[in-house]
Image: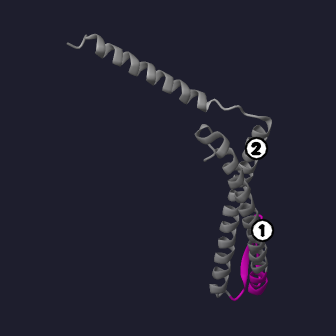
Amino acid sequence: FWLKRGFWRKAVGVVALLRRWAMTDVEQKDIEVEKEDQQRINQFSRLNLKYDDLDEEITKLKKDVQTYKDATEEIEGCMEDEGIMVKVGEAYTPVDEDTVTEKLGKMIEQSEALLSEKTEEIETLKGELDALKKVLYSKFGTSINLEK
């Protein structure tokens, strides 16, 4: 009953259709990578590495700013008569509270200014990366992976 001629003809026809469909699917994925495309991919890679470096710097700067703020709070809460003992190398040196607070304030300002600069830089970089992604995905579709 299953071996009738009509069934096998239909089955062979379906298999041939599936093979042709698979072949056209493969052919569509074979996209020529031109020199300009390769340059865009390389530029994306360089910008992505720079983005990662900036992201690490921003994380470190945020941690530094928080550390400086915590130190300032600790110093303001300290009620020592002889001042603050600051570690320089392996020795401790007495320093008055105003000097240390002033120095920490300058360090906070410098770190926050640098943090603001790096944040603006990373936002610009993100815009460039998004523009390159749009161009590359429009050309290569799912054949290219630009996500982390």
At a point 75% along the width and 50% down the height, the residue shown is: 47
Amino acid at dot 1: Glu
Percent across and percent down for residue 1 are 19, 12
At a point 50% along the width and 23% down the height, the residue shown is: 20
Answer above or below: position of 45 versus 97. Answer: above
Percent across and percent down for residue 113 are 77, 73
At a point 59% along the width and 27% down the height, the residue shown is: 27
Percent across and percent down for residue 94 are 76, 79
Q: Residues within 10 Å of mark 2 (few under 14, many from 20)?
A: some
Residue 117, label in figure: 1
Q: Is residue 35 left or right of residue 137?
A: right
At a point 79% along the width and 73% down the height, the residue shown is: 110
Amino acid at dot 2: Arg
Q: Is residue 70 left or right of residue 50?
A: left
The residue closer to the viewer here, 50 or 76, is: 50
Q: Say if the magenta span includes residue 94.
A: yes
Pointer 1 with pointer 2, Cβ within 8 A: no
Residue extending farthest front: 6
Percent across and percent down for residue 136 are 68, 44
Residue 76, label in figure: none
Q: Say if the magenta span includes residue 86.
A: yes
Residue extending farthest left: 1
Closer to the observer: label 1 or label 2?
Answer: 2
Which stretch did the figure color magenta? 81-102
Answer above or below: position of 4 versus 105. Answer: above
The residue closer to the viewer here, 148 or 104, is: 148
Residue 40, label in figure: 2
Residue 73 occupies which quadrant of the picture?
bottom right
* Mark 1 vs 2, N-terminal side: 2
